[in-house]
Image (spheres, rainbow, N blue to C red):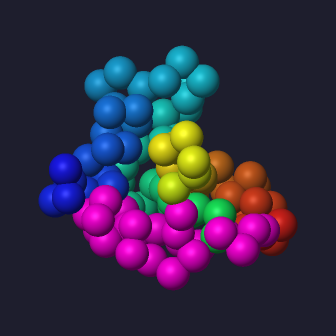
Amino acid sequence: MSSVLVRECLKHVLNPESPPPWDREKAYTTDLKDIEVYFESIEGGKMIKVPIARTLTELTRLPGFYVRRDLVVSLFVVSKRSKNFHKKWLEEI
């Protein structure tokens, strides 16, 4: 599991062959030109960009990263193809 890339994990959810029902425009893929991925820092409120070409082990070593007590890791995936939302979301973080 330590050598699995974040991108590979996202492929289970963001499969272009079978996109999620809420992604009618197919704006969410694991292509670097389409998405940005963030996690909320343990300090709270601060969003930290995740390089999806990193392994899960490398992700856990990023400053501010944490795993919740219930062993959940929350990642925020933002589509760059949704230009208005992407811009607005970046302004808010």
Instruction: Name above or below for residue 90 compared with residue 77.
Output: below
Magenta residue span = 42-66
Q: Quadrant of residue 21?
A: top right
Q: Quadrant of residue 89?
A: bottom right
Q: Position of residue 78 (x, y in %)?
A: 59, 53
Residue in the image at 57% along x and 48% along y: 69
Relative placement, left or right, of 61 versus 76 is left
Please give the name of the residue rendered at 32% of the width and 44% of the height, measured from the top-left corner.
9
Q: Where residue 58 sits: x, y (%)?
A: 31, 71
The percent position of residue 16, horizontal first and vertical second, equals 34, 32
Image quarter for residue 6? bottom left
In the image, 50 versus 74, the foreground residue is 74
Q: Does 56 lie within the magenta span?
A: yes
Q: Quadrant of the C terminus?
A: bottom right
Report the magenta stretch's main SS.
loop
Question: From where the camera sits, is residue 77 visible?
Answer: no
